Amino acid sequence: MASRNSSEAYDFALFEPKHQQQEAPQKKDNIIALPQKKLEQNRRTKVNPVKAVSTFLVLAVMLGIVSTMVYGQVQLTELTEKLNAATKTYNESTSVYTQLQMKSDSQLSLETVENYATEKLGLKKIEQNQVESISLSKGDKTQVVQKDTGTNFLTSLWESIMHLLS
């Protein structure tokens, strides 16, 4: 067979290094290009001193309100505890008073007084013959007369006005 120097049967282009494939692909940067408009939107805004002071004042007022409410609750709790203690003392005192009142009533009952008078003092009950009735005639009366203090016109006028208003 005769060899031919032609490349018709073979595609040598497949074996040749390709210029495009040999060149390394370009590295992409991690930098994203943003338009100027978007850069302005994404930029951190500067702190506005008026806004910062107003925010601080609002937080201070809120803290004051919360602390006032907590203080009020603490005061309310303390007063409730004092009220409960006073109520307990009152109830105990009422109970002691009731006991002493019952003891006093039992010692000062009419029967006890009668027994004491008859046994210790030697007294007796009143009898019918010891009672004397008195009658007053209808003419005997007593009357309190006020002294005339020398009232004048202005005093009597004042007294009549006071009498009308009362």
Image (cartoon, helix red, strand yellow):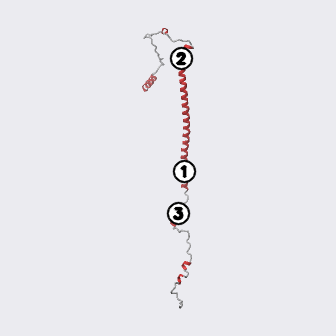
Q: Name the residue nearer the viewer: 7 or 41.
A: 7
Which residue is found at the position 55% from the left and 55% from the top?
52
Tell me where residue 73 appears, x and y as whole percent.
54, 42
Up/down of 3 relative to 83, above or below: below
- Disc 2 versus disc 1: nearer the observer: 2
Image quadrant in which the C terminus is located: top left
Tell me where residue 95 appears, x and y as whole percent.
54, 28
Residue carrying label 1: 59
The amino acid beneath tag 1 is Leu
Dot 2 falls on a residue whose secondary structure is helix
The numbered mark, 2 or 1, whose residue comes first in the sequence reads 1
Tell me where residue 110 appears, x and y as whole percent.
51, 18
**Other residues around mark 1 within 10 Å, as few (<14) / some (14–19) / many (≥20):** few
Q: Residue furthest top?
A: 129
Res 88 → quadrant: top right
The disc at residue 105 is none
Q: Are marks 2 and 1 in contact (CB under 8 Å)?
A: no
Tell me where residue 40 appears, x and y as whole percent.
52, 64
Q: Name the residue nearer the viewer: 99 or 78.
A: 99
Dot 1 falls on a residue whose secondary structure is helix
**Other residues around mark 3 within 10 Å, as few (<14) / some (14–19) / many (≥20):** few
Which residue is found at the position 53% from the left and 21% from the top?
106
**Other residues around mark 2 within 10 Å, as few (<14) / some (14–19) / many (≥20):** few
Which residue is found at the position 54% from the left and 35% from the top?
84
Which residue is found at the position 56% from the left and 14% from the top?
119
The numbered mark, 3 or 1, whose residue comes first in the sequence reads 3
Up/down of 2 relative to 101, above or below: below
Dot 3 falls on a residue whose secondary structure is helix
Residue carrying label 3: 42
Residue carrying label 2: 113
The amino acid beneath tag 2 is Val
